[in-house]
Amino acid sequence: MSNISIRKVRKTYDKNEVVHGVDLEVAAGEFVVLLGPSGCGKSTLLRMVAGLEAITSGEIAIGNKIVNKLEPRERGCAMVFQNYALYPHMSVAENIGYALKIARVPKVERNEKIRSVAETLNIADFLDRKPAQLSGGQRQRVAMGRAMIREPKIFLYDEPLSNLDAKLRVAMRLEIRKLHQRLGTTTLFVTHDQVEAMTLADRIVVMNKGIIEQVGTPLEIYSRPASAYVAGFIGSPSLNMIKGVLNPETATITLNDGQALQYDLKRWPNLHAGEIIAGFRAEAVSLCNSSKSLTLNPQFIEELGVSRQLHCELAGEQIIVTSQSDHDVKAGIPLHVTIEPGQIQLFNAQTGVRLETEVYDVDASVTQIRKAS
Amino acid sequence: MIERTPILNLVSQAILCIAFVAILSPFYIVFAAASHDFVTVNKVPMPLLPGGHLWENLSEVWVKANFGQAMRNSLISAVAVTVGKISLASISAFSIVFFNYRARMLVFWLIFITLMLPLEVRIVPTYAVAANVLSPLKSMLSFLGLSITLPEWNLLNTYPGLVLPLIATATGTFLYRQFFMTIPNELAEAAKMDGAGPIRFFWQILMPLSKSNMAALAAIMFVYSWNQYLWPLLVVTDQQNYATATMQLQKLVPSGQAEPPVWNTAMAANLIVLLPPALVSILLQRFIVRGLISTEK
Ligand SMILES: Nc1ncnc2c1ncn2[C@@H]1O[C@H](COP(=O)(O)OP(=O)(O)O)[C@@H](O)[C@H]1O
Ligand SMILES: [Mg+2]
């Protein structure tokens, strides 16, 4: 167990900078997920920690020791790859024990460790098989066993679950989390799947084009996304966002089609009139016929059993609304809704940065988070 | 392409059979001729059924052409060339594919160019070097204005002389390069994370994985070097000790002038000489296709 410090780390490939100065502290024993779309530099960052990629500038320290110049094997990290990267010609046991063989661990001790790791991961019955004879989930376990057996200071995972089918992914997610609870090894986990990030992480690092957009616990990131970018990435469905013009006198946001959205003036007493992005959760919309109602055009209804997701059009933009299944809603028939002003979040229309509220009495969870941090 | 018409099947079977006969009939004629005595083989037309003198012809020619020594020479040099080519090819492909250094492309192209310079094209300079190994160094030194007397060191009439000039191989390097490029990068990285250095990765992971490649290359290269004729002819003057099987075979082929046309023993010698490459091909044939397309993983 070691902490990781990443300080002003940059990475350039042939004059093309792909990681633009990242700062990140990972505490010992923490499970941190790097989340972002494909190509945003997550893997590159992870591989710089592993030592598989040279660091162009900046510093990475593991356990307070700067590792920039150290070979991968000297850093005490173990890595699990997306395509498993098992040695095809070696049996499962040989795959798992290869690192120990290289480290000249005596055979008896090695076999004992292989067996205990295999039992932990439920692959003890396959020790003699070749990777080609295993299913995807079993290969994934072997890859994890290969990482575990070295008792590393740090686990690095690069999208380890992406090649599995949906059901297995959920099961393996749980196992990875359990493993972490038991071993307590500091973990950096890369994924583009926000559900994976939300369910696994102690803290999530949301990345965008080589920079960090936000670092926080899953709840913090869900309830207080630092930018429109993060808001659009987190949650299923993600935050609805809509452009409009803010009028502080009336505490409304006028949308493109002339409809107005109420926001909570108490939270932002000092805003100026102008362009703004308003955000609200699908659950914050209630179906009713009050005088202040908005009109939506449902286009397509997704039945989930417990509830429904209504894909609607509002002022030319797509939004998603959650409704109870007993509401009588039909695609094509306009729908009247209200949105509680306290549920509206605001983002700068140009930069996408969240406008922090000045009063936090609305949302209990938000208040708690503020107290905690 | 899956066609299920019986006529098409029949036609393709027929074509296969004709090709089979066309390829094998010369071998059969060699075999038949080798089994007759001198008189029968010179009848016109030569009887196509095998006669009873095969063993007699084989043993006669084995002694006459000193095949005991010649076969050993051929075997030693062919095995050495094959091993040398495979080692050189795998190591140079390893360097080109798995290491990132500035001269990588330059090295790649230099190897590529040698593809256009087979031994036959560069035979005169190669002979000059074989006759005096240090001569390139000497001319380099004299170009720099130094005149140091270097010892004479020639490879004529030695095994290294037979083997070394044949070892450089662009084909093998490319075959290995193709194979190495199909190996996912993550495999090399996983090995690095496990603490394996480059040499261990090469020996314990790449080499076992490239077994079918190696077998295919070995079969091709063995046959290639066994069949070498021009180079041994140049580099070997001590026929008694260093003649190769192909050189000895040539001496037995009747030239059609003074000597009697002893085709029966010439054909028997032919059978002897083609046996080792045929055996190697048969033993390794199941790897040849697999290793050459290298999609098996
Ligand atoms: N070896 C490389 N050479 C050049 N560019 C690379 C290399 N590896 C990654 N990149 C570029 O760096 C960016 C980030 O890649 P990566 O870290 O793999 O993204 P992610 O893992 O978030 O999908 C991408 O634009 C990619 O094209
Ligand atoms: Mg990636």
Image (tube, coloured by chain):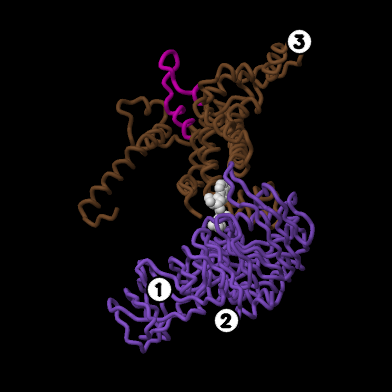
Q: Is A265 rendered above or below residue B295?
A: below
User: Which quadrant: the N terminus of chain A?
Assistant: bottom right
Q: Relative to the observer, which residue lies in front, A296 or B185? A: A296
Amino acid type, mark 2: Asp
> Dot 3: within a 10 Å radius of its alpha carbon, few (fewer than 14), some, or many (20 or more) residues?
few
Looking at the image, residue B126 sits to the left or right of residue B48; the answer is right
Task: Looking at this view, name the residue that lies furthest to the bottom.
Answer: A326
User: Which quadrant: the C terminus of chain A?
Assistant: bottom right
Instruction: Determine which quarter of the picture holds residue B214.
Output: top right
Which secondary structure, mark 1? strand
Q: Which residue is mark 3?
A: B147
Q: Relative to the observer, which residue lies in front, B207 or B243? A: B207
Q: Which residue is mark 1?
A: A260
Which secondary structure, mark 2? loop
Q: Are marks 3 and 1 in contact (CB under 8 Å)?
A: no
> Dot 2: within a 10 Å radius of its alpha carbon, few (fewer than 14), some, or many (20 or more) residues?
few
Magenta-colored stretch includes residue A169: no
Chain letter behind tag 1:
A
* Residue A52 circle label: none
Residue B58: percent from left, percent from top: 50, 33
At 56% from the left and 62% from the top, the residue drawn is A82
Q: Which residue is mark 2?
A: A363
Instruction: Determine which quarter of the picture holds residue B157.
Output: top right
Amino acid type, mark 3: Ser
Q: Colour of chain B?
A: brown
Amino acid type, mark 1: Ala
Q: Relative to the observer, which residue lies in front, B118 or A1? A: A1
Q: Colour of chain A?
A: purple
Which one is closest to the eye, mark 1 or mark 2?
Answer: 1
